[in-house]
Image (cartoon, helix red, strand yellow):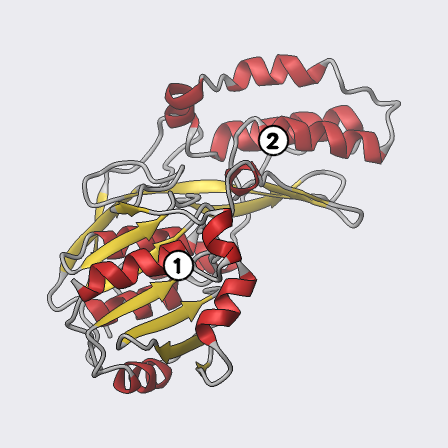
């Protein structure tokens, strides 16, 4: 299959996280603070969008946290201050790594209902389901195919997809459950999505940074998905989503949402549409951040996720009865 979503250099950014050159500053708490603030200031890609969404002002953030930094503070105290400062970006792709801790922002899913249950998954999957690399799949009793993909960090090959789709070929419709899929390999997400397109299809746009200014970006570059040369699925599809769908899984939901025979069912996705890059501070701590924004086919931001076509949520009452209302909503939609 022709790879169309990312040029090789940008795909390498996504998979391996490139490093950027930064001005050398002293290895002191104030030096590390200044280094981190300037790395983000010059290379982060969502300043304007987040200023519009919730009033982010990165200069004000500098003033807010500068007074908390002293060259007499411990490494633990410095790590806490820097992590708090990065949390102002509200970005799950922004992480500070050290040998003692991993700074992260997880409110993109922790602040919302889970809308997923391991217990219910085991009930619907049973014990006789098929496993093909990262895919788990079976036929439900109403002749609906059910595919569970927990993480795009676990790859699937073309042969795996051929086997799974062949097994499910007689089903009237297909459910792809990516709830709690936090992302992984964008190429794997593309490989799966290509099984559901039948002609070259516009699925989004991308930009990349061209300078250190907040608005220094290339023009929007159209991103297309091309059909797989292997077995493809022609029947209706429901993709199940929740707030823990992030990064490459969010991109998969965006691409599938652009296809006419696909409906997203469940909760709003978590987002994470910036391809990450990385650099390091004078003390050796690693900082990862969003550097290249990606958009949907209507040129809309998906950094904070996308809404489902058919909203659905788990309830305590239905869960106690062993019923996953998100799966059942998709089953009804595909049956009708």
Could you tell me which residue is drawn at 50 percent across and 63 percent down?
Answer: 120
Classify mark 1: residues with Cα within 10 Å, few (<14), some (14-19) or many (20+). some
Question: Badge 2, how many Cα within 10 Å: few under 14, some, many 20+?
Answer: many
Residue drawn at x 75%, y 34% is 79
Q: Nearer the viewer, residue 126 or 111?
A: 126
Residue 215, horizontal then vertical, whole percent: 35, 26
Q: Which residue is mark 2?
A: 86
Q: Is residue 6 left or right of residue 154?
A: left
Q: How many marks?
A: 2
Image quarter of the N terminus: bottom left
Q: Please say if the residues under marks 1 and 2 sit with CB atoms less than 8 Å apart.
A: no
Residue 324 position within the rendered picture, expressed as x and y whole percent measured from the top left: 42, 58
Q: Is residue 26 visible?
A: no
Q: Is residue 95 above or below residue 80?
A: below
Q: On the rendered structure, is 211 left or right of 203?
A: right
Q: Which residue is mark 1?
A: 11
Residue 44 visible: yes
- Does dot 2 land on a helix, a strand or a loop? helix
Q: Dot 1 lies on which element?
A: helix
Say whether disc 1 or disc 2 marks the residue closer to the N-terminus: 1
Q: Position of residue 244 (x, y in %)?
A: 48, 49
């Amino acid at each position: 299959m022709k790879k169309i979503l990312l040029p090789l250099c940008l795909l390498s950014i996504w998979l391996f996280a490139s490093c950027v050159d930064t001005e050398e500053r002293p290895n002191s708490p104030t030096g590390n603070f200044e280094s981190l603030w300037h790395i983000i200031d010059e290379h982060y890609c969502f300043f304007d969008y987040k200023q519009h969404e919730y009033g982010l002002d990165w200069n004000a953030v500098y003033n807010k946290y500068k007074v908390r930094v002293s060259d007499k503070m411990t490494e633990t105290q410095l790590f806490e201050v820097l992590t708090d400062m990065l949390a102002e970006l509200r970005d799950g792709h922004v992480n500070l790594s050290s040998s003692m801790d991993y700074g992260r922002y997880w409110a993109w899913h922790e602040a919302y209902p889970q809308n997923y249950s391991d217990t219910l998954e085991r009930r619907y999957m049973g014990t006789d389901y098929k496993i093909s690399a990262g895919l788990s799949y079976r036929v439900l009793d109403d002749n609906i195919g059910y595919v569970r993909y927990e993480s795009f960090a676990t790859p699937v090959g073309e042969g795996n997809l051929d086997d799974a789709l062949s097994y499910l070929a007689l089903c009237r419709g297909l459910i792809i459950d990516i709830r709690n899929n936090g992302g992984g390999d964008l190429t794997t997400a593309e490989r799966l999505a290509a099984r559901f397109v039948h002609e070259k299809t516009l699925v989004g746009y991308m930009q990349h940074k061209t300078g250190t200014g907040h608005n220094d970006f290339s023009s929007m570059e159209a991103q297309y998905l091309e059909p797989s040369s292997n077995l493809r699925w022609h029947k209706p599809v429901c993709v199940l989503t929740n707030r823990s769908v992030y990064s490459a899984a969010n991109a998969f939901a965006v691409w599938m949402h652009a296809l006419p025979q696909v409906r997203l069912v469940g909760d709003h996705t978590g987002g994470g549409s910036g391809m990450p890059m990385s650099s390091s501070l004078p003390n050796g701590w690693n900082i990862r951040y969003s550097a290249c924004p990606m958009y949907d086919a209507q040129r809309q931001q998906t950094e904070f996720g996308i809404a489902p076509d058919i909203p659905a949520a788990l309830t305590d009452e239905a869960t106690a009865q062993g019923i996953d209302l998100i799966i059942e909503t998709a089953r009804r939609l595909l049956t009708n």
